């Protein structure tokens, strides 16, 4: 159907608070840019995680070129950066690419 899935969403400065801070589900924020090779490598793993954990976690993608206020707000120094929010607060952060198994383990450990 080519529509965004509700558990994989794009977020910008205007949608950060309702999409992340006020989410009833944990939110994994992917800060990325289209020109970033490691970001493009991580994208399929995050899409897979969003599908696997649909209904229990949401993946929010933030293009740092289009939403610099969000990356500044989160004090992002390099990409890809993944930030995990639960209950409206940051509970985990990882900078750099990681395979799907590593992402799963990091998310699970951060949410424990």
Image (cartoon, helix red, strand yellow):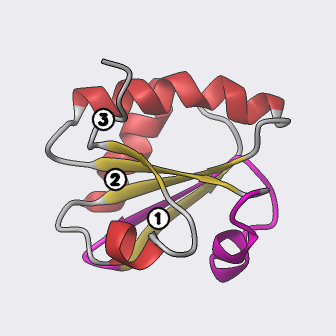
**How far apart are the two marked residues, 3 and 2, measured between alpha carbons?**
25 Å
**How far apart are the two marked residues, 1 and 2, measured between alpha carbons?**
9 Å
Q: In terms of image quadrants, where is residue 69? A: bottom right
The mark that comes first in sequence, 3 or 2, is 3
Residue 53 in the figure: left or right of residue 80: left
**How far apart are the two marked residues, 1 and 3, measured between alpha carbons?**
24 Å
- The correct choice, above or below, for 75 with respect to 23 in the image is below
Q: In terms of image quadrants, where is residue 7? A: top left
Residue 43 in the figure: left or right of residue 32: left
Decide whether residue 101 is among the magenta residues. no
* Span colored in magenta: 66-88
Contact between marks 1 and 2 (CB within 8 A): the answer is yes
Contact between marks 1 and 3 (CB within 8 A): the answer is no
Residue occupied by mark 3: 5
Q: In terms of image quadrants, where is residue 13? A: bottom right
Q: Which mark is residue 32?
A: none
Q: Is residue 31 visible?
A: yes
Residue occupied by mark 2: 109
Q: For mark 2, does the 10 Å Cα neighbourhood hold few (<14), some (14 to 19), or many (20 or more) residues?
A: few
């Amino acid at each position: 159907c080519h529509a965004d899935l509700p558990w994989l969403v794009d977020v910008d400065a205007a949608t950060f608070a309702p999409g992340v801070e006020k989410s009833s589900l944990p939110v994994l924020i992917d800060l990325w840019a289209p020109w970033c090779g490691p970001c493009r490598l991580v994208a399929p793993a995050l899409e897979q995680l969003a599908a696997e954990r649909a209904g229990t976690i949401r993946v929010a993608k933030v293009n740092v070129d289009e939403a610099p206020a969000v990356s500044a707000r989160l004090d992002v120094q390099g990409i890809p950066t993944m930030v995990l929010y639960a209950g409206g607060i940051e509970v985990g952060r990882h900078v750099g690419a990681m395979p799907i198994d590593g992402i799963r383990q990091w998310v699970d450990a951060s949410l424990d």
